[in-house]
Image (cartoon, coloured by chain):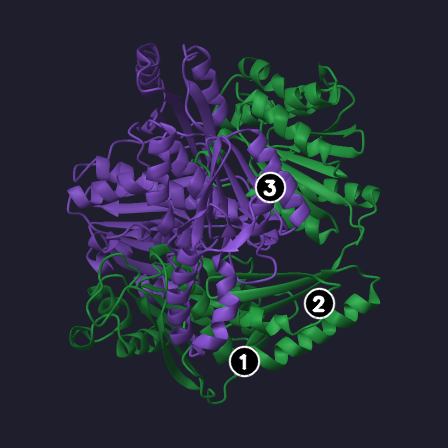
Chain colours: A purple, B green
Amino acid sequence: MSRPTAAVLLTGSELLDGRTRDRNGHYLGGTLAASGFRVDHVVLAPDDPDVLRRDLRFLLDQRPALLVTSGGLGTTHDDLTAATIAGVSGNALVSDPEALRMVTVTTRRVATRRGLAFEELLPAMARQALLPRGSRAIAPAGVAPGFALRHEATAIVALPGVPWELEAMWPDVLAAFAAEAGAAPARRLTMRIYGWGEVQVAALLDGASTERLRLAITAADGEVTITAGYDADDRAASAQADALAAALRAAAPVFSSDGRSIDFIVADLLRSQGATVALAESCTGGLLGGRLTELPGSSDYVLGGALVYADAAKHELLGVPADLVAAQGAVSEPVARAMAEGVRERLGATYGLSVTGIAGPGGATPDKPVGLVFIGCAGPGGTVVRRHEFPGDRATVRAWSVVSALHQLRRALAAGASALPPDPLVAT
Amino acid sequence: MSRPTAAVLLTGSELLDGRTRDRNGHYLGGTLAASGFRVDHVVLAPDDPDVLRRDLRFLLDQRPALLVTSGGLGTTHDDLTAATIAGVSGNALVSDPEALRMVTVTTRRVATRRGLAFEELLPAMARQALLPRGSRAIAPAGVAPGFALRHEATAIVALPGVPWELEAMWPDVLAAFAAEAGAAPARRLTMRIYGWGEVQVAALLDGASTERLRLAITAADGEVTITAGYDADDRAASAQADALAAALRAAAPVFSSDGRSIDFIVADLLRSQGATVALAESCTGGLLGGRLTELPGSSDYVLGGALVYADAAKHELLGVPADLVAAQGAVSEPVARAMAEGVRERLGATYGLSVTGIAGPGGATPDKPVGLVFIGCAGPGGTVVRRHEFPGDRATVRAWSVVSALHQLRRALAAGASALPPDPLVAT
């Protein structure tokens, strides 16, 4: 239980007042935890020197082995990170020769891309080479260099806030500091469940011996995830994790116990079976396709699909009979079936996957409430349509629909080309 | 400049170690700022009683007018929020009769939905009625009630972590506490720019008088946003904001100066012109459709579209000639054109919008790098195809593609049914 601790400071007023949704905290926290750090603090701070200073002081007072900051390294007046770290750590802000060399290279590239004069751009860009004395510059992936500085018990690493730049610069930095801090990748059991609510899972856990495990339950988009972290050399914890995994597998609808999310499971099943999938989306509007094509190489198994928002599009693109839609309504079992079968045939895919529902807030009728969604999966073993009533607002209904469609495809793939097993409706 | 201050504490180990990406901080921060609070602190805390206590103490030491917490109000062992607030505020944890009444009602509903016995479920659920003495229970939208408690200078409000529950419970609470804290909605000028980089915008701002404005620049997905906040009764600030807006409009490619994002602008243009749009997506995989259908009522103008990931799908769904794809490559100006025109004709839409590109990391060739994207827009005035080279990783290329497609549609809509004006390529 002696993992080195890490803290994350995300700067930018836009992260606190609703203008921008932070992405770096999630990424940094996940990679730090996977490398064996215990992430105790993630703080978002505005571009206000006083608040930034108080937050930095508070975080350094916690004496983390590693403190990572993101943002505030750019060329504008509200880029305060280097100056604030310099102040709090008692180092002067100086122009770093190595950082200046890096900035000169990137300035040349930016000038070319934007059609601007290098000499006019350089003075503003050179601000990015001002670092606390004693820092080591970190080569930029985009425009701004980062830097690393040791202060008392803590290694401070400052990275730019643009997510893809930060993500390109981070892995090498993390590897170096994880080694230095003596972080050993922790063991983590991850069990994912679909079809049960959090309270049912919690009741099951109450009877298990878990005192040596760092246990957590999270619920999102219809899935419940249980994680149990423990140190790699703790044999008693390892035995508890094994027993917990067995108990969950025996009692609950576990679909993943090796850490893979539903995205990777579906992708692996499609790829290993040489199967392809085609999509017919209505209320999800393309989000299912967006999700399935998120993984690199998804063109191996995603052929394409149809976004059939309007009823006429259902007919025109997929051959869903207009009188079927008129008689049953666009949100109905027969239409979900016709959509799945239509897109499968149209694109010659192994599986056709369809979603039609009422995401709200409008569109409900007395017998078709907001949250009513039909998901169809047509495959070699036939077509299954499942009816769901999802809770929540428009975004939630759409998110649950995407996840449930992925699970329906997973079940069809798991059953392979043979007839699909009977499958109870999921109460959600 | 005397806005009441607010702090946000988001609890849940899953938010710090990469398992779940927080959504509540973004929502709470945005609504607090819009109601006139200055959001100085957003802190993510793990389900660790010691850390949670230190974070709460730090935040209360800042003496915010309002401290909002999310999460940790459920039925599991790591739901610690009520107990920790009780400890830090020096109040005992007691079963609150009003909260218990609320929990009984929701328990009955959950039992019915999941097919469980009410009596068996109630003991676990009743934990949610344990509140710090002196609290006022807040009716739940889903399962867990929230509560409000005054402590010294600060009103503490605790809400559940499930986003849709929190978002349903929050508006009434916010309105009450904003009135109590004397928060007056601040004025905010928001100028959005597409086609310039952050460094160009920053250079323009250097010459402006902005000392009475709370100025911020953010860049994301190819857009740069400048916001200038100021107090409603500060006339000098108001004059500076007006001058800034005029200067930006004169010099930079501003597309929005009334706060609306590109989503709302495109939606309003489509609706006001009675126009419809159909989509043909390749590398974005459905994300463009997902974005366009995010707004309620989007079925008024989104007819549908085709996800044409495989070359055969381009032909089968949109009639793009197979020999055109073979000769030019799927990522090419002629194929983007054929996709846009094909989907427009197929669905009888006013506009056809297409995206084809190389999102990476694979698929690049010497003359077609990762990030190369063609976006086509076919409309009454003809078809325009624009070539982009976007920076960054797969997710970034896809995000920039979606935003750029929306801008291309905006330009076509702004030009109305007349011939499209000449439009320089955007260097990105």
- Judge if badges 1 and 3 mark residues of a common chain: no
The quarter holding residue B174 reads: top right
Residue at the spot of label 2: B210
**Residue drawn 67% across the image and 31% down it:** B58
**Residue drawn 41% across the image and 66% down it:** A104
Q: Indicate the chain on which mark 3 is placed.
A: A
SS state under label 1:
helix
SS state under label 2:
loop
Q: Is residue B195 visible?
A: no
**Residue drawn 56% across the image and 34% down it:** A60
Q: Are marks 1 and 2 in contact (CB under 8 Å)?
A: no
The amino acid marked with disc number 3 is: Val
Residue at the spot of label 3: A88
Of tags 3 and 2, which is closer to the observer?
3
The amino acid marked with disc number 1 is: Ala
Residue at the spot of label 1: B414
The amino acid marked with disc number 2 is: Thr
Q: Pick whichever, A297 or B89, lies toward us.
A: B89
Q: CA–CA distance between discs 1 and 2?
A: 31 Å
Establish if A181 lies above or below A314. Answer: above
- Judge if badges 1 and 2 mark residues of a common chain: yes
SS state under label 3:
helix
